[in-house]
Image: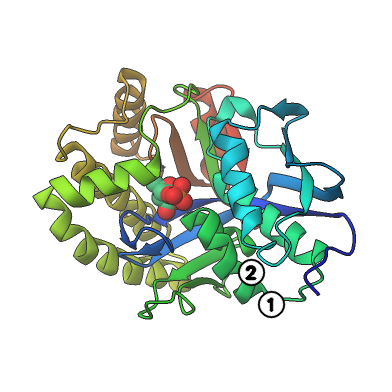
Amino acid sequence: ATIPKASAEHFAPSNIALCKYWGKRDSELNLPVNASLSVSLDTLGSRTRVEPIEAASDEVWLNGVRQVSDSRFARRVSGFIDLFRIRHPELAFRVDTHNNIPTAAGLASSASGFGALTKALVDAFGLGLTATEQSIIARLGSGSACRSLFDGFVEWQMGVREDGLDSHAVALEQTWPGLSIGLIKVDESEKSVDSRAGMQRTKETAHLYQSWPLQAASDLSRLQQAIETRDFALLGSVAEQNALSMHATMIASWPPLLYWQPGSVAAMQKVWRLRAEGLAVYFTMDAGPNLKMLFESASAAALEAHFPGMEIVQPFGV
Ligand code: PMV
């Protein structure tokens, strides 16, 4: 059953963490130091097609552009396919990924990309795996990709096993119509320190990092409570504090790791000012300079006046 039956094409959504994954306890298997919680971005994400080809090596395409085979992206994709062709190393594939995440949003696409690639390879190899099993495999491509196997609110349970077989995402049942995520682009150029290197540096050099697992555990349970009771102020404030706590550990690393740019700080200060004026808006940020605004649809019009051109996603509808 390890010979691919055919080509296959699948979609996986991008996701935004409200309680971040930051730090690995095993960097080969992408086993996290802490559990995390995200919301998937509905129809924004990656569509990936895999097709067996007669060739000596893989062909990797991204948004219609062939990637040189020794590029970082192509090597990561081929390395991930290696997990599937262990018994048939001679197999080669054409991998064609399209991200419909607006490039202007400055959103990372590795989570949706490895999510979609996992689904497509599992299908092409006829493996018939459950979503939980696919989440475990996607995690090996990029940690946060394990959450992109599910829609809505998703929790990545860190697990305790050394082999990682209990470290996967689960979908939470709750929905939240009107919950909105606004994507604010500050800068979309490629970051100089990727999340893998950033996590490693933080864990190895920042004493402040020791407090991170406690912060994350407390935030996770408060977010679960916020989702259960649909308490937006709780959801937003915990998400914002969680993101800033993660960034504090990065800044306390050596050499220092500051993903913010002047535009990031200006946007944060604008959010704080708007909140002081009574608008219920919070933000979260990942390992980059861009902000993701959290608000409810009733606040959308007021917020858009302050952030013109902001892309808005409503994962659970209006
Ligand atoms: O999945 P990775 O290795 O790209 O790490 C993602 C890290 C953050 O985006 C900063 C946080 C998260 O949980 O998505």
Q: At label 1, which amino acid type do we have?
A: Thr
- Which of the two residues, 180 or 28, is positioned nearer the viewer here? 28
Residue at image point 21% right, 52% down: 203
Residue type at mark 2: give it. Gln
Q: Position of residue 271 (x, y in %)?
A: 35, 33
- The answer to whether residue 173 is above or below residue 66 is below
Q: Is residue 162 left or right of residue 41?
A: left
Q: Which quarter of the figure has residue 86?
A: bottom right
Q: Which residue is mark 2?
A: 134
Residues packed near mark 1 inside 10 Å, few (<14), some (14 to 19) or many (20 plus): few
Horizontal and vertical percent for residue 41?
62, 50
x, y (%) of residue 9? 82, 53
Q: Residue at x 41, y 28 (%)?
A: 191
Q: Assign the N terminus to one quadrant of the image.
A: bottom right
Disc 2 CB within 8 Å of nearest ligand 1 atom: no
Quadrant of the image occupied by residue 280: top left
Q: Nearer the viewer, residue 233 or 18?
A: 18
Residue 264 sits in quarter:
top left
Residue name at image x 60 percent, y 58 percent = 148
Residue that appears at 33% across and 54% down = 22
Residue 298: x %, y % from top left: 55, 45
Q: Evaluate if marks 2 and 1 touch, with contact meaning CB atoms under 8 Å apart.
A: yes
Q: Please determine whether, in this image, residue 275 is positioned above or below residue 199.
A: above
Which label number is shown at residue 130? 1
Measured Cα–Cα span from mark 2 to mark 1? 6 Å
Q: How many marks?
A: 2
Disc 1, SS: loop
Q: In the drawing, what numbered circle is on residue 82?
A: none
The coloring applied to the image is rainbow
Q: Is residue 151 visible?
A: no
Residue farthest toward the top in the current orientation of the protein: 262
